[in-house]
């Protein structure tokens, strides 16, 4: 068959050659060792935490080597595409501080010299390379219908053979030019397939930067390169794009390992240098039903969606710190030794990533988030809380804006000292955290070991000793002396030693005062709370509590 004639029949509108395309995409001028990585999602739904994880790993790898990290949108599956899918992806990674060097910025805008960065706009590029494969005898049109392919599959299953379109089952491989011409003239739809040079008795090996050496059977399937509408399959498009865009390291989920023989073969037949691969294991979760582990599920787990972390208000810095922890287990130790150093200084390595799936632990994330927030200044906490509230709780945002100085004082309680409190794990917690500062409590978590009369007596007495001018050093000794006068032990140890001699201890007395003022047993430093509330408000709340107790 005259392959040139066939190529012209299949691609009459393609006039450029691969060399013409290559000239538009010159080799990147980067320093030795610099890595070019990409995040290449499909705009078919919300951004998954696993996608954010992969993007973050790609970004870290590029940054560490002084390379390039870009965003490419693989939108060849138009049937599954969702409205504003690209915007959701761009916003999702940007909101977590993952910045791209090149790629899509909005649904239509991009930055960089290696675009277009959406595959749907690169149709002619793919067809140019496909036409070249036809000329070289490495691709051909296939007119098999879905019914014919299903029949082949049934036959293979009955004979216990590997399913697929290959060897003797690839019936369109040997079709004549005249038949092809006649079929096209009659309007028969067709795909273009790779004429695989693979053999069933051969195996391939490649070094995965996370998994180590992987050995697999060579690809023998005549995979589809172009679908009936001329749009490429993922396999074909990504090989061409990664070559032209200069991708050195393909970092992706390990569900793609099974496709590696196809991809390596495509790079080979196209005459491209093969990139390095790093396959990331999925993020797992403890399954309460089975007691085992499972992948984070879009359907079952709200934390699977990146939007969840915004909605509840986890700081982006805490989320990235946590992702680094599950990416490289030695990061946690490094962070403990370097609490104030940027995570950019951490020596992240793909080779230190887990070969098995990292276990997602929301409690661990919460702990990291508390540690992050407790180190922020009161002004930073106010600004970050207000930013969150404007998006998710407008009533609370209004309250914060109208009481800015007061709110900043609230967030300053037990902040900036050697051991700051860790009451806030995410910005939504601030609503509960600040509630009793903006409204007097209507319910009270009274100590269970004291009677109402005991508590009323404590509060009546405290009103007589509480002073506007007392210092942090003065106020608790006053409470201790008052407690002793009312028949309570001055110290918990003393009460424990002789419980029959006392009504309780000074901790019980302080707890009654705390609950009267805040409604809660557990709060930050009570002296600081009273200083923020002010003398008159403290007295009013104590009076209210006494009236409720009586």
Image: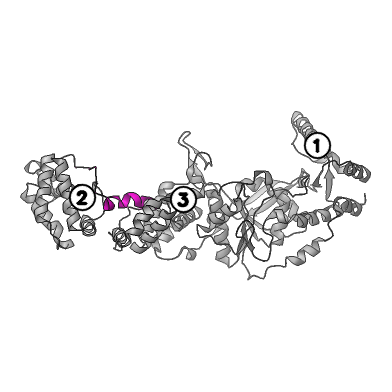
Q: Secondary structure at mark 1?
A: loop
Q: Which residue is mark 2?
A: 517
442 and 202: which is toward the camera = 442
Q: Determine the image quadrant of residue 245.
A: bottom right
Vertical side of 114 occupied by 427: above or below: above
Q: Secondary structure at mark 3?
A: helix
Q: What's drawn in magenta, residue-wise?
A: 423-446
Using the image, tell me which numbered label, if any, was put on residue 448: none
Residue contact between numbered discs 1 and 3, judged by CB atoms under 8 Å:
no
Q: Earlier in the sequence, mark 3 or mark 2?
A: 3
Residue at the location (75% across, 49% down)?
231
Using the image, tell me which numbered label, if any, was put on residue 145: 1
Distance CA(mark 3)–CA(mark 2) = 33 Å
Distance CA(mark 2)–CA(mark 1) = 77 Å
Q: Which residue is mark 3?
A: 309
Q: Determine the image quadrant of residue 479.
A: bottom left
On whether residue 438 falls in the magenta region, the answer is yes
87 and 371: which is toward the camera = 87
- Quadrant location of the C terminus in the rendered image: top left
Residue at the location (38% across, 51% down)?
395
Residue contact between numbered discs 2 and 1, judged by CB atoms under 8 Å:
no
Residue at the location (69% across, 60% down)?
116
| Label 2 vs label 1, nearer the camera | 2
| Farthest-out residue, top | 158
Numbered-mark total: 3
Distance CA(mark 1)–CA(mark 3) = 46 Å
Residue 135 visible in the snapshot: yes
């Amino acid at each position: 068959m005259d392959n040139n004639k066939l190529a012209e029949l299949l691609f009459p509108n393609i006039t450029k050659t691969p060399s013409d395309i290559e000239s538009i995409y010159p080799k990147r001028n980067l320093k030795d060792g610099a890595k070019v990585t990409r995040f290449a999602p499909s705009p078919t739904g919300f951004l998954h935490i696993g996608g954010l994880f992969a993007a973050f790993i790609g970004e870290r790898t590029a940054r560490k080597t002084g390379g390039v990290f870009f965003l490419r949108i693989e939108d060849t599956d138009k049937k599954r595409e969702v409205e504003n899918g690209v915007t959701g992806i761009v916003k999702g990674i940007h909101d977590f501080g993952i910045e791209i060097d090149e790629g899509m910025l909005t649904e239509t805008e991009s930055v960089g010299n290696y675009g277009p960065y959406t595959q749907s706009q690169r149709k002619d590029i793919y067809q140019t390379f496909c036409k070249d494969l036809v000329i070289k005898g490495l691709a051909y049109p296939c007119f098999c219908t879905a019914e014919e392919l299903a029949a082949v599959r049934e036959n293979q299953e009955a004979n216990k053979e590997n399913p697929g379109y290959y060897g003797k089952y690839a019936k369109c491989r040997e079709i004549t030019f005249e038949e092809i011409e006649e079929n096209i003239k009659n309007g028969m739809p067709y795909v273009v397939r790779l004429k695989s040079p693979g053999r069933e008795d051969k195996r391939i090996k490649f070094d995965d930067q996370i998994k180590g050496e992987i050995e697999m059977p060579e690809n023998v399937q005549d995979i589809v390169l172009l679908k009936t509408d001329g749009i490429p399959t993922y396999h074909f498009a990504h090989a061409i794009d990664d070559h032209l865009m200069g991708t050195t390291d393909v970092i992706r989920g390990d569900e793609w390992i099974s496709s590696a023989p196809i991809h390596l073969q495509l790079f080979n037949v196209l005459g491209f240098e093969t990139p390095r691969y790093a396959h990331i294991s999925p993020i797992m979760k403890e399954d309460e039903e089975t007691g085992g582990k499972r992948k984070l599920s879009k359907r079952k787990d709200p934390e699977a969606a990146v939007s969840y972390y915004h909605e509840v208000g986890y700081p982006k810095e805490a989320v990235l710190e946590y992702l680094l922890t599950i990416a490289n287990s030695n990061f946690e130790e490094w962070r403990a030794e370097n609490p104030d150093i940027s995570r950019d200084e951490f020596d992240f390595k793909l080779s230190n990533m887990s070969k098995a799936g990292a276990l997602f632990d929301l409690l661990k994330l919460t702990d990291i988030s508390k540690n992050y927030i407790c180190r922020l200044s009161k002004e930073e906490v106010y600004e970050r809380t207000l930013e969150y509230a404007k998006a998710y709780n407008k009533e609370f945002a209004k309250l914060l804006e109208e009481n800015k100085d007061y709110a900043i004082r609230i967030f300053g309680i037990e902040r900036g000292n050697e051991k700051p409190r860790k009451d806030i794990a995410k910005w939504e917690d601030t609503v509960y955290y600040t509630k009793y500062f903006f409204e007097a409590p209507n319910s009270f978590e009274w100590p269970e070991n004291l009677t109402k009369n005991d508590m009323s007596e404590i509060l009546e007495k405290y009103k007589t000793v509480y002073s506007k001018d007392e210092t942090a050093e003065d106020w608790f000794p006053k409470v201790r002396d008052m407690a002793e006068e009312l028949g309570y032990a001055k110290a918990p140890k003393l009460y424990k030693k002789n419980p029959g001699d006392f009504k309780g201890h000074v901790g019980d007395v302080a707890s009654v005062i705390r609950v009267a003022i805040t409604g809660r047993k557990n709060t930050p430093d009570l002296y600081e709370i009273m200083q923020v509330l002010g003398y008159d408000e403290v007295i009013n709340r104590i009076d209210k509590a006494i009236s409720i107790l009586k």
